[in-house]
Image (spheres, rainbow, N blue to C red):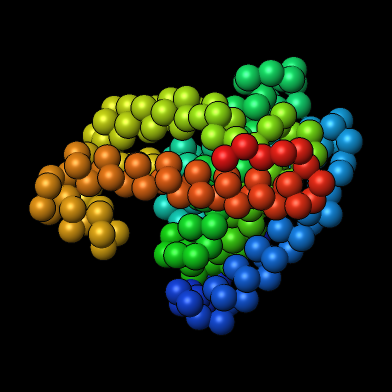
């Protein structure tokens, strides 16, 4: 190739969904992430914030490396807008480096609650159905798996930590919804404004591409694309709320305060 990125171009046989590689990498990774987060739940607040911020900078560096790899190796000095880093699972690379610099208050609580609900959902969903994570390149495949395993770790750590957020209640979950809503709006803006530059489908809610998910696809055919997208977004909110509740129960069992549901 002669681009200087050959060291990242090691090939591999593209793994199969629910094959041995997928099940082992996802299963072991999630177990390690949850276990590590549980063991670190009593970190001091300063150490917790530094760890969260450090992982954020690590994710940012990994994303830059991935973008260079895609540009040089996969698309031969062409940019694929499909991989523009503004999916649900990309958001921690923007949030986590900022969190340590925020004082206790609504902004920090909103980001941390978002990590323990929506981003935890994104990480687990991508590992459960990893169609977009399995590639014929070793680096690209492992990048995707490790990225989403880190999302599970961040979400569980924010949920398990003794002082990350002041309470565990439906009211606390609501503070993540503005972050979710603004992110969805930005994703929609990107999908519309950048559509002419190539294929782009941030949050998988582009009005130009029908859903490939069985249930949502059927709804779109019956009720139209706007209805399908609305149901998809509502389903994500409900899934995030469910995970938020499960993590909160674990937090209480680990010595947290009372939970009001």
Estimate the x, y position of residue 123 in percent, counting from the top left.
55, 53
Depth check: 195 or 80 in front? 195
Residue 130 shows up from this direction? yes
Estimate the x, y position of residue 191 in percent, counting from the top left.
31, 34
Depth check: 77 or 187 in front? 187
Depth check: 250 or 103 in front? 250
Instruction: Please name the residue shown 63% across and 19% down the image.
Output: 106
Instruction: Please name the residue shown 17% across and 50% down the image.
Output: 220
Is 117 drawn above or below residue 45 in the view shown?
Answer: below
Instruction: Please name the residue shown 47% across and 25% down the image.
Output: 178
Estimate the x, y position of residue 253 in percent, counting from the top left.
76, 52
Is 145 drawn above or below residue 102 in the view shown?
Answer: below
Instruction: Please name the residue shown 84% across and 32% down the image.
Output: 45
Depth check: 76 or 102 in front? 102
Q: Is residue 50 left or right of residue 115?
A: right
Q: Residue furthest bottom?
A: 20
Name the quarter where the C terminus is drawn. Answer: top right
Residue 71 shows up from this direction? no
Total count of labels: 0
Is 247 drawn above or below residue 163 in the view shown?
Answer: below
Estimate the x, y position of residue 169 in percent, counting from the top left.
60, 35
Q: Is residue 194 left or right of residue 70?
A: left
């Amino acid at each position: 190739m002669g681009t200087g990125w050959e060291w990242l171009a090691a090939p591999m046989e593209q793994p199969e969904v629910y094959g041995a590689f997928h099940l082992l990498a996802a299963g072991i990774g999630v177990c390690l992430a949850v276990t590590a987060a549980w063991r670190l739940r009593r970190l001091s607040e300063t150490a917790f914030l530094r760890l969260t911020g450090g992982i954020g900078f690590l994710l940012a560096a990994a994303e830059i490396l991935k973008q260079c790899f895609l540009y040089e190796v996969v698309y031969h000095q062409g940019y694929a807008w499909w991989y523009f880093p503004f999916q649900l699972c990309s958001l921690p690379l923007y949030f986590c480096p900022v969190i340590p610099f925020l004082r206790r208050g609504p902004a920090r609580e909103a980001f941390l609650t978002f990590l323990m609900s929506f981003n935890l959902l994104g990480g687990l969903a991508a590992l459960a159905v990893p169609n977009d994570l399995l590639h014929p390149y070793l680096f690209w495949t492992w990048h995707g798996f490790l990225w989403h395993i880190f999302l599970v770790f961040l979400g569980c750590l924010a949920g398990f930590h003794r002082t990350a957020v002041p309470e565990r209640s439906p009211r606390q979950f609501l503070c993540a919804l503005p972050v979710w809503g603004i992110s969805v709006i930005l994703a929609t803006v990107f999908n519309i404004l950048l559509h002419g530059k190539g294929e782009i489908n941030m949050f998988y809610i582009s009005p130009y591409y029908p859903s490939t998910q069985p249930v949502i696809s059927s709804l779109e055919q019956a009720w139209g694309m706007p209805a399908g997208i609305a149901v998809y977004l509502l389903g994500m909110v409900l899934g995030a709320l469910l995970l938020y509740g499960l993590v909160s129960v674990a937090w209480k069992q680990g010595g947290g305060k009372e939970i009001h549901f």
